Structures are given as C-alpha cells and as structure tokens.
Image (tube, helix red, strand yellow):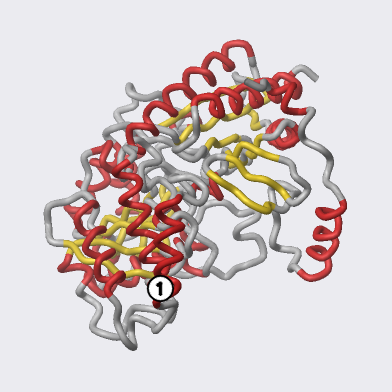
Amino acid sequence: MLRGTELANMISPPGGKTESLLEKKRRYVARGISSVAPIFVESAKGSVVRDIDGNRYIDFSSGIGVVNAGHCPDPVVDAVKAQSERLLHTCFMVSMYAPYVELAETLAKITPGSAPKKAMLVNSGSEAVENAVKIARAATKKTGVIAFEAGYHGRTLLTMSLTSKVRPYKHEFGPFAPEVYKVPSAYCYRCIFQSNYPECGLHCLEYFKRFFVSEADPSGIGSMIIEPVQGEGGFIVPPKEFLPGLKAICEEHEIVFIADEVQTGFARTGKMFAVEHYGVAPDIMTLAKSIASGMPLSAVVGREDIMDAPTPGRVGGTYGGNPVACTAALATIDFIQKEDLCGRAEKIGAVLTHRMKSLQERCPAIGDVRSLGAMVAVEFVKNRETKEPARDEVIAIIGECLKRGLLVMGAGIFSNVVRFLPPLVITESQLDQAIGIFEESTDVVCRK
C-alpha cells in the first residue's frame, strides 16, 4: 500500500493539457468562479479522480458532499443511460412523468416524521431553500425568517441573506432580503456567550427569550432554518439538546421548523438524515447534493398541510424534477440503502475521528476535532489558548495534500477548518492512505 510520501512521487506538476485549459479558463470563465484545485478532471470512479494529465487523486471532497455513493456508481449510471434514451425533458408542469411522482413518494417515506408528507423538486440547494421559505410564508402568513450564525444556505438573494459569512459570499452584493434575523448557533468551541457545555445550560437556547423581546416579535416569524450540522461554517455539531430545544420553541410560537439537510443528508452522518440523531421531525426539509449522485436535483419535503399551502402554479420551475435526475435519485437512494452506506459512514467517521484526535495530541495547531458520522472536521489555530484562527496554515495544508494526491477542502467562518467528505464507498486502504497524506501534510506545514 502506498503511503503519503510514495504517492507524492506519482503526482506530477500540471502538464500541457492542464496549462492550455487554465489559459482558456482565464480567458472565458468569469473570475468569480474559483476552484480549490488547479486541475481538470477527466474521469472518476468510486473515491478516485483522474486528471487530464494522468494524475490520480483520492477525493475527500466528494464534489462538496455530492457523491456520498461514490463517483459514477454503476446502478446510477445504468439508470441514467436508460432514462436518457426514453425522455430527457418535457417540464413536469406541462406534461408529467412517473419518476417525479415515484421520487416524491420515496422521499416522503424515508424522511423522519409520521405525519403525511409531500415533496416538490427543483434544481439546487439554494432553490430548495428559497421554496421552503416561500411555502412557510404561504402556510403561516408570516414573513420573518430566523437563521443562525455560521450557517450557509446558498448564493441567491434570499439564501445569501440567510448565509452567515461576509467574504466571499456576501461582500458587495447587498442590499439583502428583508425580514431575516440572525441568532447565535451552538458553536461550542467558540461560544459567543463565553460558556462551556454542558455546564452552560445552553445559553444559545435561552437567548430566544431576549431575542423575542429585543429583536423580533414571534407573531411575525414564519420560519426558522438551520443545518443540523453547519457545513460551510466548519462542520459545527450542536449538543444533543439543541435541535429539540429549537423545535419546541417553534411549536410554542407556530413557527415552521426547516432543517437544511443539503450537505448532511443521504447517509453522510451515519443516518439517512442528520436530524435523526436528535430525534427531531422537521416541518420542512431541504435536500440536494447527494440526492442524485451529481445530477442537478433538489427537493423540499414537508408536512402535507404546510406543503399544500401554495395554490397551483405558485411554486415550480422549468427544469425542476427533470426525469433523468429523478431516475438518478431513485437509483442513488436504492444504492445507499442496499449497500448500508449509513453503517459505512459510522465506520469511516470512527476511523477518521480517532486518527485526527491522535494527530491533535502531537500537533498544537489543531484546536478542535469534531464529527458526526463521516462528516469530520479539524479546526486549526495559532494558539490553543487564544484560539486565533490559522487560516494560512489551512491553505498550506490543502496545497500539500494536493501535491501528494489528496483532494480536501477548507471551511469555517474564519476559513481555518479542514473538512473531510470522503465518498462512503471508499476502501479501507484508500482511507488509510488518505489519512496518511493528511497527517504528513499537516506535519510539513506545522513544523515550518
């Protein structure tokens, strides 16, 4: 089995093909579209991607959590091929097709909650969030939305307003959508209340008593949206009492509780959906990313009485629930269940967490290691006492990993977190190899 140093010899500098495409990208692609790795992928399978110059990389990004079932899983590819020969598009709002209805039924059955549920399908996570808020407003006749610091919900006007990171997501893009209120999240490592869990008694929940007096009347709040584990915010895993406490607050004030499971859904955390760890049944869920193994698709799933609030014609979209994407989703969900990728996520997460905590013991720059299933993050600091974010070190570590054949990504509102999102089909040897590369890259950077 190759270790990190040996693999480093296999990764050559970008060749002529890459340089040529990079020049075209600089010439024709808008500057605002950035890329973590300066490579162009030619093909991918399972947990490995291959670039156009022949270099191979273990993928610990999964296309930002999109290929939980791995790159190009055979059953999904076969289903896409078969469907694309029959029907590419009609627009469900013009003339219908079975895969849309079948997927809506499947999502209603696999999402948590015993109440009757319905679903609508759109194209992206941002679009799902936009529609979830619209539906909540139609159901409650209340316009206000509560979102959380360190949360990420997208790049459209409303979802960017809900998102909590100025650069690069919000800088120079204002003014933002009105009636959006931010409250502190349960970021225990950097508690805004300077408290320590569990002795704190969850000040982040107690804060709502003040919030509903000083910031917003609950009679005007229609929805509250939160990621069960905050993704772009740095894989912030809340205490077990937090989500049930939020749900209770929503029920008390007739606020629609929206769980944004765009990044946490479809087995990533060891359960099909992360809210299942907390015993919470959201009123509405937003789903995307790994729903269809890379085909553009997202969904809003929720209680029937809420989802039916908008009258016909008030929600939808031309490409929403495309037949090929729906077929890919059905095959993906079946693959996740048959291969027990939830169980695999638990095992991957246990290995990653153990190795990262061991690395933390010998690396003072690692301030925190946190995880839920195979959603694992390492937060880097310049000083463990002050917790000053180590952003430059994270950039350097990601670069060293790339040299050695590992694709990883950063995260965090201070950009000082490395997040791990390996495909859940990764083999034991690939997992061990990838961890070895990360350990070596961290040692190289932190010993400079």
Q: Callout 1 environment at 10 Å: few (<14), some (14 to 19), or many (20+)?
A: many
Q: Residue furthest top?
A: 362
Q: Is residue 176 above or below residue 418?
A: below
Q: Which residue is mark 1?
A: 322
Residue 281 seen from this side: yes
Q: Is residue 299 above or below residue 445?
A: below
Q: Residue at x 60, y 58 (%)?
A: 169
Q: Residue at x 41, y 67 (%)?
A: 82
For residue 252, side relative to residue 54 (left or right): left
Q: Quadrant of residue 140?
A: bottom left
Residue 206: image x %, image y %? Answer: 30, 39
Residue 264: image x %, image y %? Answer: 40, 45
Q: Residue at x 21, y 59 (%)?
A: 108
- Is the N terminus in the top left, top right, bottom left or bottom right quadrant? top right
- Is the C terminus in the top left, top right, bottom left or bottom right quadrant? top right
Q: Residue furthest bottom?
A: 94
For residue 139, side relative to residue 54 (left or right): left
Q: Residue furthest left?
A: 115
Q: Nearer the viewer, residue 76 or 388?
A: 76
Give the amino acid type for the residue marked by disc 1 in the picture: Asn
Q: Quadrant of residue 230?
A: top left
Q: Residue at x 48, y 48 (%)?
A: 67
For residue 169, side relative to residue 294 (left or right): right
Residue 126 seen from this side: no
User: How many marks on residues?
Assistant: 1
Query: In the structure shown, which secondary structural element does the residue marked by tag 1 occupy?
Result: loop
Q: Nearer the viewer, residue 153 or 63?
A: 63
Residue 199: image x %, image y %? Answer: 33, 21
